[in-house]
Image (tube, grey):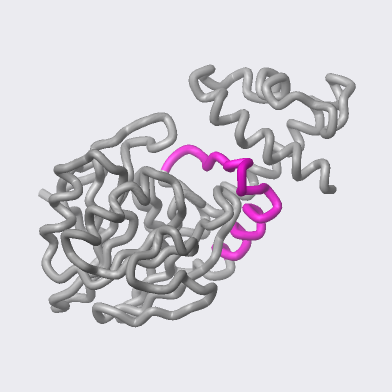
Amino acid sequence: MTPQHPAYGELREITPFASVILCDNPGMMELDGTNTYVLRAPGSDECVVVDPGPPKHKKHARQLAELPGVALVLITHRHFDHTGGISRLHKRTGAPTRARLAKHCRGAAPLRDREVIEVVGLRITVLFTPGHSGDSVSFLVEHDGERAMLTGDTILGSGTTVLDPSDGGLRDYLNSLNRLIVEGENTKLLPAHGPDHPELIPVARFYKTHREERIDQIVAALDEMGVTAHEAKPMKVVRKVYRDVDKKLWPAARMSVKAQLEYLREA
């Protein structure tokens, strides 16, 4: 029987060229855990690892290090549940690591937008998709007419994405969703958290609509509160707009509200 998500610690095949190992690090931000992808064309002796996961998960790290022929490690963005395992995997395999930020690279240059990487029999196109974080990247993987998009945390397999106000932003995020819609025809969605989906575009469109509706709700809440986006306190907005959401999620919602208020201030 083919394993289904979530299948912790199993190398689960999604396409002939993409498999996933789910790290056992579930949480409010990580959902079921971090999806580490293993990419290789059928018959290839080498593979690419995408997002080696968090530190201090020795079983996950060991499983990745024992993969045959790790030729390259790619990083979708800077958050620790994606980058924490970089040094351990590099030490064990010697494989170069590439990310948008130089501090996460090992033995290789930072990624460039629209760069095409041809490796392990695959064509991987780098797409900068900031918003969730300033350095967020998606990877379009193509082989023999099949396409899959690894979206990191820009689009998740369930729920919606938190925008990190320290370097992410709603304007960039909406532009990134538009970019994924344009690039995503006949393309599977392989997110960094949550289950994979057979089609990227419907999920990306849902995400865009959701953000636009949230902005409308925040504007209405500001009018009701009698304050401007410049004057509003993020948590007060959360209490109005997210009152039907579990309070455990309010700290995450506050991060997105901060980014949304900044968007309105710039309008």
Residue drawn at (59%, 57%), measured in percent from left and top?
177
Q: Nearer the viewer, residue 177 or 23?
A: 23
Q: Is residue 220 left or right of residue 83?
A: right
Q: Does the magenta stretch include residue 165?
A: yes
Residue 149 appearing in the image? yes
Residue drawn at (22%, 40%), measured in percent from left and top?
57
- The correct choice, above or below, for 1 with respect to 46 in the image is above
Quadrant of res 257: top right
Q: Nearer the viewer, residue 245 or 163?
A: 163
Residue 151 picture location, percent across and down:
45, 57
Residue drawn at (66%, 23%), measured in percent from left and top?
238
Number of disc labels? 0
Residue 248 picture location, percent across and down:
49, 19
Q: Does the magenta stretch include residue 39?
A: no
Span highlighted in magenta in the image? 158-181
Residue 148 picture location, percent across and down:
38, 66
- The correct choice, above or below, for 5 with respect to 239 in the image is below
